[in-house]
Amino acid sequence: MEFPKQWQQQMSKGEWIAACLRLNMMNGEYESQQVITENQIAKQFNVSRSPVRDAFKILSQDRLIQLERMGAEVLPFDETKQQEMTDMRLMIETFAFTKVIQREDLPSIVHAMYQALEMMKVSVKFKDPVSFTEHDIAFHELMVNACEHSYLTHLWMQMKPLMLCLVYIGMLRRMNEDIEDFNRIIHNHQKFVEAIEQKDRGLMYEAFRLNFSDLNNDIGAFWSDQAK
């Protein structure tokens, strides 16, 4: 699977190699426990071993590989890890919702989210999974950034490369196999904006349930009073 060229701008060689490998590992193109070496990857990307070493460090922080003396062992990216990622998103975005609805400039945040949602619709119209992924992540990131919480933002940015890959893989597959499903996806995101605009906790729980229930079977743990 090819890493989108639009996302390569301002990346170092090591970051670019890590991004390419990350996408393919998360897409299941490497087998669990498969061993990859610096020499092998350097030859594949026609680079020296130095940027490959940098890439391996990044992927190790992503928990996608385990560094070994002679190379690296690919770790499984399975349903459990996907659910763990969703757990983290739920924690971040649940907290973000409680902070965002307290802001005096809430109308401008809602406006920006509606703009991102319109761009998602345009991306679907032109069958552009790269653009859709960018605007999807930006849509949720607006809420996170509006918290003005440095540690929360830092955690989000650490997860962002993984989220980009996961969303891109899913959106590319949907656009090729079930383009009509985007009507549901757009509708579900609409619920997010409405919940924030109305400061409605029950509606926000419903938005999370609609958006993440296919990836996480324990959403109620984050919204226990709404899940009853």
Image (cartoon, grey):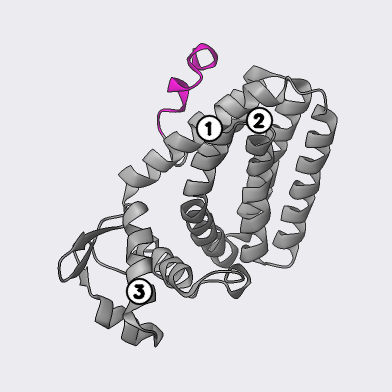
Question: Tag 1: residue type?
Answer: Ile
| Residue at image location 72% in from the left, 54% down from the top | 120
Question: How far apart are the alpha carbons under marks 2 and 3?
Answer: 36 Å
- Residue bearing the label numbered 1: 92
- Residue bearing the label numbered 2: 147
Q: Secondary structure at mark 1?
A: helix
Left or right: where 179 falls relative to 197: left
Q: Earlier in the sequence, mark 2 or mark 1?
A: 1
Give neighbour class at mark 2: few <14, some 14-19, many 20+ (Cα, 10 Å): many
The span picked out in magenta is: 217-228
Total marks drawn? 3
Question: How far apart are the alpha carbons under marks 2 and 1?
Answer: 10 Å
Question: Tag 3: residue type?
Answer: Val
Q: Nearer the viewer, mark 2 or mark 1?
A: 2
Please, is residue 88 above or below residue 27 in the view?
above
Whole-percent x and y of residue 194? 75, 30
Q: Secondary structure at mark 3?
A: helix
Whole-percent x and y of residue 222? 47, 22
